[in-house]
Amino acid sequence: MESVQRIRYPPFDHSNIDPGSIPIIEVIVTSDSPPPTPFKIGSDDGWMVEWRGLKAEDEGLPRIQSVTTTATLPFLMRTRNGWYIEPDPLHAKARQLIAPTVVLLILSLFLHAIAPAVSDVPLLSWLTQGSYKIGPLDYPKLLFVTFPIFVLPILLRMVANSRDIARQNAYIANPVPDPEIRYTVGDGWIDVLECNMPEGVIQTHSRLQAGVAIPERKTLLSASNRPEGGQPPPGMSTPLPEKRITSGEEHGTGVGESTPLPVEYPRVLLLEPLRVRTRGPDIAVQNEFPYRIEGPPIRWPGSIYSSVIALHWELHIHADWNGTRLRWVKPIIMSQTDEAVIIDNLPLRGARSEDSDA
């Protein structure tokens, strides 16, 4: 069966990019499986994703053969299934300090340049005039004030990365079993019938969320009529060497640092964010069963996957394990809606795990 898929997926640094400058990828998808209930999230002049029936004016679009399934795709089962370690909070604090410290450095250079003009101002004259001799070189006084502050974000990142690596190694040395959970899936929600955490793991809250995963790289290249090895479409990177493949590059657009430093392990222990994601409310720990975990307030389409559009639902359970914040992620197969879904805005999140809450 044939259907039309249209997508303008946000690149890594989407907050600094005008979506209108990036073309919409439009393809006719041929599949042995029936298409889902039509849906459109976003607008044609912004970031958007759409899956609809074929129209007469679509005949000139590129055609691709793709599996259309409600079963979670293998790359999502590898990268978004199981326990994950939350990044150290110092990562976010370090990123927040970058802009102020750069401004401070520029200001100090400016004051040093106009030092003769502020020679009569007591404090500024003391800071901008004179130097300290260390070895054979003289260093301006102002450098000793501004430079330690300028490198503070770097030092915080080093501390945060070392903590993340230590937590990952602790998990690898003693992996946490999956929780024992039974649930039923409803219309945009799930009812939890039973939930038992492993020994030593304390559940804090849980939630249900839906999002759109990164499209498949080779399909985007084919739809854009661009060969592998040439200039990629806007928002995509050139291929990385085989030993430098990131989890994002494996299945789409691996641009930027989406997670802190991972350690070598059969699967990544730091959850890469979904750039397109909406979620339901956080649900505190419940002692009585069953209890309901609601999805997003606006009903999203059900689970559906192809090489272009992968609309994905998942359950998140947040927990504490020996002082380490953990998150258990479980893909959910959500049923399709009876009516077409039209949502005006595509909800975007930061592409860095320390900023986006995945």
Image (cartoon, rainbow, N blue to C red):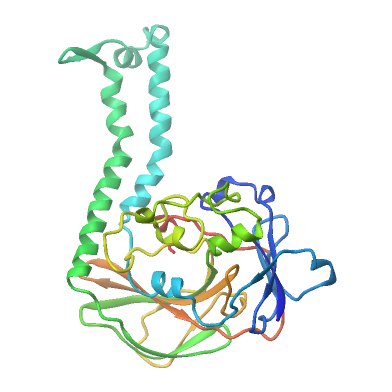
- The quadrant of the rendering that contains the C terminus is bottom left
Q: Nearer the viewer, residue 330 or 296?
A: 330
Residue projecting furthest to the left: 135
Identify the residue shown where x is 42% and y is 8%. Answer: 117
- What percent of the width, then of the height, locates residue 150? 33, 33
Q: How many numbered badges does the structure rendering display?
A: 0
Task: Examine the rendering and report whether any part of residue 317 can be seen.
Answer: no
- What percent of the width, then of the height, locates residue 292? 47, 86
Q: Nearer the viewer, residue 311 or 3?
A: 3
Identify the residue shown where x is 72% and y is 77%. Answer: 2
Q: On the picture, is 91 further left or further right than 65? A: left
Task: Examine the rendering and report whether any part of residue 266 can be seen.
Answer: yes
Vertical placement of residue 142 versus 332, above or below: above
Instruction: Kindly indicate the quadrant of the structure image that contains residue 87.
Output: bottom left
Q: On the picture, is 59 further left or further right than 25? A: right
Q: Nearer the viewer, residue 111 or 151?
A: 151
- The quadrant of the rendering that contains the N terminus is bottom right
Instruction: Kindly indicate the quadrant of the structure image that contains residue 59.
Output: bottom right
Vertical placement of residue 238 versus 199, above or below: above
Identify the residue shown where x is 57% and y is 45%. Answer: 16
- What percent of the width, then of the height, locates residue 283? 43, 78
Identify the residue shown where x is 30% and y is 20%. Answer: 142
Q: On the picture, is 30 further left or further right than 242? A: right
- What percent of the width, then of the height, locates residue 291? 44, 89
Q: On the picture, is 242 further left or further right than 25? A: left
